Image (spheres, grey):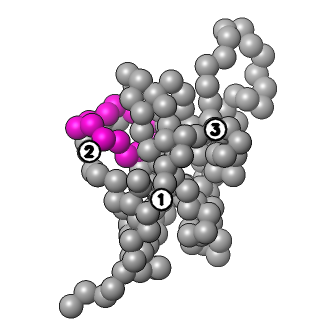
């Protein structure tokens, strides 16, 4: 017999700089030659060797119960080829993701996001067979700075982005 759990449906809203501000930054195109300012990605990657790579992800649906954070670096993600994608994010409280702060965003393919240090995140998710994403993090982020919370175990909740 399995323990009962709730399904939390998260409405994915189109990302804006203002709506995403608690979790990180939305970075859009700027004119070449623009001087660095607060609209540019405010990176924290000084604690190791930066790794910038293209990762291919395959469709995993829109349900999740694992959510992850990185405590020592920011992370930047964006899709290639203009593909729209989805991401769920939350703020941490007492070393766990806060369900009250859990939000889902639709992210167009003409921008990228920078996740703040400590932002809990699940995704990227999308509706096609596969999407290539560029990813900027540290070379050992997924080994030494990858804390995951199982929402089923912690809150008896599974989430679905709608």
Residue at mark 2 to residue at mark 3: CA–CA distance: 25 Å
- Tell me if 77 is positioned left or right of 26 in this view: left
Among numbered discs 2 and 3, the one appearing first in the sequence: 3
Q: Which mark is residue 59?
A: 2
Q: Is residue 130 magenta?
A: yes
Residue 138 at least partly seen = no
Give residue 5's position: percent from left, percent from top.
Answer: 36, 81
Query: Image quadrant for the N terminus?
Result: bottom left
Among numbered discs 1 and 2, the one appearing first in the sequence: 1
Q: Main secondary structure of the magenta part?
A: strand
Residue 162 at least partly seen = yes
Q: Which mark is residue 10?
A: 1
Q: Which residues are magenta?
A: 124-139
Label 2 residue SS = loop
Give residue 110's position: percent from left, percent from top.
Answer: 50, 24
Residue at horizontal 41%, vertical 55%? 161
Disc 3 designates what residue? 16
């Amino acid at each position: 017999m399995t323990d009962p759990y709730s399904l939390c449906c998260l409405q994915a809203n189109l990302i804006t700089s203002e709506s995403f501000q608690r979790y990180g930054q939305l970075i859009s195109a700027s004119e070449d030659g623009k001087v660095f300012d607060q609209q540019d990605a405010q990176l924290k990657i000084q604690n190791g060797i930066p790794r910038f790579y293209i990762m291919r992800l395959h469709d995993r649906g829109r349900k999740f119960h694992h959510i992850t954070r990185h405590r020592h670096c920011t992370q930047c993600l964006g899709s290639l080829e203009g593909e729209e994608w989805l991401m769920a994010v939350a703020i941490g409280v007492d070393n766990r993701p806060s369900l009250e702060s859990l939000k889902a965003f639709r992210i167009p393919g003409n921008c990228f996001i920078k996740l703040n240090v400590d932002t809990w995140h699940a995704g990227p998710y999308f509706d096609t067979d596969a999407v290539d994403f560029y990813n900027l993090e540290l070379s050992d982020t997924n080994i030494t700075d990858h804390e995951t919370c199982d929402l089923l175990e912690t809150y008896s909740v599974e989430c679905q982005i709608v």
